[in-house]
Amino acid sequence: MSKLDNAVNFGKVTVLNPYGSGNTSIVLQAGQGALLPTAPFNVVWWNSAVYSDPSDDPNVEIVRVTAGGGGGGGDTLTVTRGQEGTAATAKNTAGGIYKMAAAFTAKVPNTDLYNAFDGGGFHGRMPNPSWPKAYVNNTVNGNNDVYTVPTGRIAVVFGLTVANFGANNPNYYVQFKTGGTYYQWTTAAAVGASPSNAANVFVGMICLLQGEILSLHADATGMSAWFNVIEFDSATTDITRGLITSLSNGSNTLHTVASGKTARIMPQMFAASAVNVGSGGVQVFNASGGAITLIFYAVPSGGSTGVTNEFWTAAPGNLVNTNAFLPGNLTAGDFIVVNTSTGTATQTAMVVLIEQ
C-alpha cells in the first residue's frame, strides 16, 4: 500500500545556484537539507526576492525530491521537475533568491490519502478510478456488449442489477469477451415478467484487461441491466488476476504470487455472509456439457498439490459457476491450482488478487 509523504513543519530552504528548466540536481545552502523531510516528498520552488507568496510567481514550480534532504540525505537534492500540473521553468533571474518549501500540495490529499486509506485498503490500490457507463436499457436478442476496457486501464466488476418491465420474459447471463471469444460467467436466469421484476445479481468478481469486453446475453428484447464497474490505471495498480479460459484435464496452475510480493484474494461485493466479505473466491464456470469434479489447492512455494493444501472441492453441473472461498493470505511463490476431472470442453477459471 502507498504511504503518505514524510513531512516537517516550516521546511523552507534556500537554493544555492541558478538553474535552468532541465536541471535535476539542485544544491542548497550548506546544512539546509536537514530542514527538509526524508525523501521522497514534494516542494514548492519560487523566486522569493520578487514574490513573497509563491502562488504569485508565474514561474512557480512543484518538484518531487527523490534523494537528499532530511534523514541524512544531504544538501544536494535529486528532483523530478514540473509536478502536479506545473511546468519546469528556469530559476535564474538576475537578483533572484530562490527558495523551496516542503508544503502541503495537492498530491497528499488526492493521491496519498486515497492510496493509503480508500484505494489501498479493502479493495486494493485503484489509481485514478472512474465509474464508466456499463449498462443497456433495452436488450437485443443475443449479445449485448456494454463496456470495453480502454487502453492503459483495468476494470473490476462487482455486481449487476437487472429489471424487466416489458411484455417479454428474457433469460440472461453474464459473459465477457477476450481474444475474440465470449465466455459465459453466470448461470442463465429469467428476469420475470412485467410489471415489477428486478434483481441484484451476484457475479462474484470479474477482472478485465484493456480491450476485453463485458457483455450480457439475453434471449429476448426489453430488459435493462446495470453493471457495477470500477475502472483504473493498469500500470500502477496492485490488483492482478489469474485467468484460464479452457481448463485442461487434471491440475491447472491459475496464479503464482510474484517474487517479493504477498497476496490475498480480493474480497467480493453483494456478499450474503461474513465469509464472502472477509475473503474472495476462485471461480470456475463449467461449460463442459456435464457434471465435473473440481478440487482447489493453495500450494506453498516449491510444494505440490495434496490433501494438506486443498481448500475447496465441488461437483458442479453443466453451466454452473462455482465460487471457492480462500480466506488466507499467500506469499511469494505460492500458487493456486484448479484440478478438474475433465477438460474436454470449456471450463473458465478466474481469480482476482490484491498483490503488494
Image: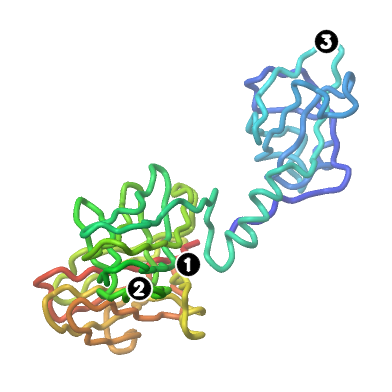
Labelled pair 3, 1 in contact (Cβ < 8 Å): no
How far from the left and from the top, in percent, is residue 236? Answer: 49, 49
- Mark yes or no: residue 253 visible: no
| SS for callout 3 | loop
In the drawing, what numbered circle is on residue 233?
none
**Viewport quadrant of the N terminus:** bottom right
In this rendering, the answer to whether 306 lies above or below 178 is below
Q: Is residue 329 above or below residue 66?
A: below
Contact (Cβ within 8 Å) of mark 2 with mark 1: no
- Residue 141 position in % (x across, y down): 21, 60
Does the image show residue 138?
A: yes
Amino acid type, label 3: Ala
| Residues packed near mark 3 inside 10 Å, few (<14), some (14 to 19) or many (20 plus) | few
To which residue does mark 2 refer?
Answer: 194
CA separation in Å, label 3 and label 1: 53 Å
Q: Which mark is residue 262?
A: 1
- Residue shown at the point (85%, 16%) measured from the top left: 96
Distance, label 2 to label 3, CA atoms, is 78 Å
Which amino acid is tagged 1? Answer: Thr
Examine the image and state in which quarter residue 75 appears. Answer: top right
Q: Nearer the viewer, residue 136 or 25?
A: 136
Q: Earlier in the sequence, mark 2 or mark 1?
A: 2
- Residue 94, numbered label: 3
The kind of residue on which mark 2 rests is Ser
Image marks 2 and 3: residues in contact by CB distance under 8 Å: no
Residue 256 placed where, x, y %? 34, 66
Label 2 residue SS: loop
Please tell me how crowded label 1 is: few (under 14), some (14-19), or many (20+) other residues with Cα within 10 Å.
some
